[in-house]
Amino acid sequence: MLQSSQILTASTLAFACAVVQGVLALKSGVWKQGRMQLMLMGLGFLLQTGFIYLRGQDVGQCPMKTLPDILVFIAWSIVLLYFLVGSAFRLSLLGVFTAPLVSIMQVMAFLGGFEAYPPRGKINALVELHAAVALIAYAAFALACITGVMYLVQERMLKRHQIGGLFYQLPPIQGLAQAIQRLVRLGLLLLSISLGVSFALETSVSNPKLVFSWVVWGLYAVISVLMWRHFTSPRRTAWLAVIGFILPFISLWIVTHA
Amino acid sequence: MPETTDNRSGLVCVGLNYKTTPVEVRERLAFPEAQVPQAVEQVRGLPGFEESVVLSTCNRVELYAAHSLPSGDHGHAALRDYLVKRFELEPEHAEAMVLYNLDADEAARHLFRVVSGLDSMVLGETEIFGQVKAAYKTALASGATARTLNKLFQQAFTVGKKVRNDTMIQRGSTSVGSVAVDLAEKIHDLKECRVMLVGAGEMSRTCAQSLLSRGAKSIIVSNRSHEKAVELAAEMKGTAMKFDEWEQALHEVDVIISSTSAPHFVIKPDQIDQVMRRRRWEPLLLIDIAVPRDVDPAVNEIEGVYLYDIDALQTIADDGRRERERQLAACERIIEEQLEKFGYLKPPGSSQPGLLVS
């Protein structure tokens, strides 16, 4: 019987292989959005799902309480959204940009170590829903960040007349700009739902977890308005999507240690 | 296991192309599209001939045939005589006609290279694939093909696809027009792309046509001579605009191709800065083909504006050509592998140049 840590190791290896395969394919110039990349990402995702299931069995609840568990859950949500968004927006190469982040997050989770949870009483479904939806929202912000990186790379090549290699594989910058906007809106919507659920919980409004979630919500609300009203150029909004993700990422530490 | 057939089912190819024959001669020997079915029948009807395909494009005229004559040389001679008679060439022209005469594996290799775009004037171009397919379909519809040519052409299409998929032979742009299209495609959705021509030079016209042929939404033409603008706009199914009005429409377009003969910059940073605000930062591609340049290079510093002058376009096209040339060896390797796989190559130690049919 495989242990959950072995499954997560296999998942991380699958994503690492997706990175290597993507880089080699790009280097050789014969990039195909094809099977190998999707298979590796799919395999990694299935193994991630298996890990979360087994971990849930181990701790007797949805495994979202410690930082390593949260990192794995967000990584899982990122890959899930990649499968949904990548094909919907025809964002070729999104997998190549996604796999490194997912691999790093899972390696960080390993370094953190998976502790046993203290025994807890009855599971509150609303708490679980609030946490899960918030983490999927963070995954949407992570994908917006990745798409922002793709935008900035493509934009730089266009400005500097560096036509070749990666340039031909990346989508048009206008499509990338639209994808960033949609992902930020999706994340904002999910985070709003999560925060809406929190009103039904018996949690103090001054709880640091909630305060930080509201700060993240505020940041992305501002970014979303700036994008929607075209107050800044797409390049600046791409930067905002990239830098903006630092806040939710840092907030994970604070939230889990609060 | 491949089996060797004798020369009675011999494959031959006789042809001429832009490398062997100047255009003045090629145009005399070209088969009009409507006459290709008749030509296919005529070749197949030659004594000893069983199958035929006629490929006639602006760059090449090639006859592919399967025959049961005693040797390939007889087949070549018969096809050469056919061309002389068909086009009623004077003896001196007939003698001066330079044809390539290919047998069995050479003919198959040649067709595989043609379909892959390796024998084209623009290395790796894709149009030839469709042209060969059309030629084969015409022959097929006329009932002029059978086992040998059906197999050969199906295999050629497989090889052509493999070469394009497994190498970068069609990657990059090799002409200024195709660079313009590639750039526009990496900025906008081309189907929503509105183009403006400022000045109606030959190269800007080529760029605009390339964009339109790839699906650009609309075109506005503005030129000092309004008559010329109207004429060009009609040709491209676009709109003509008076030369003193083009600045007012700048914010409505996504690609501007400029080629005026003005001795100074006609598009300046202040102007484009205003345009970008009105466009709400929608990206703008500026292609400056004029010499002296029409667009102040400082325009490229504005966010969302991408400026390419003629030197930049030419450099990208040159890089694209070099990149394709670097791919040649890989393409040839694939073709040789496929020739072997399909059984066209001579078995080791064989002295018979026969066609192998798998």
Image (cartoon, rainbow, N blue to C red):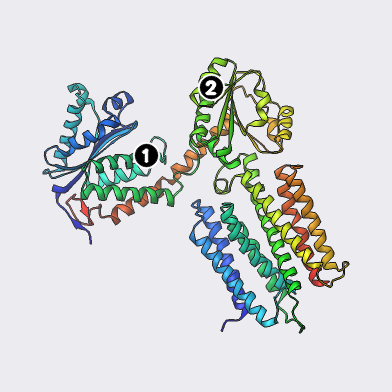
Q: x and y percent of residue B93 in the render?
A: 22, 23
Q: Quadrant of residue B138?
A: top left
Q: In the image, residue A242 lies at what x, y percent?
A: 72, 53
Q: Is residue A250 above or below residue B144?
A: below
Looking at marks 2 and 1 on the same chain, the residue that comes earlier in the sequence is marked by: 1
Q: Which residue is mark 1?
A: B128
**Left of A44 or right of it: where is B123?**
left
SS for callout 1:
helix
Residue B183 visible to the viewer: no
Counting from the top left corner in percent of width and height, residue A29 is at 50, 51
The N terminus of chain A lies in which quarter of the figure?
bottom right
| Residue, disc 2 | B201
Q: Secondary structure at mark 2?
A: loop
Above or below — where is B11 with respect to B226? below
Amino acid at dot 1: Ile
Q: How many marks?
A: 2
Distance from Cα at disc 2 to Cα at disc 1: 28 Å
For the point 62% across and 41% down, the residue is: A158
In-image side of B147 versus A247 (left or right): left
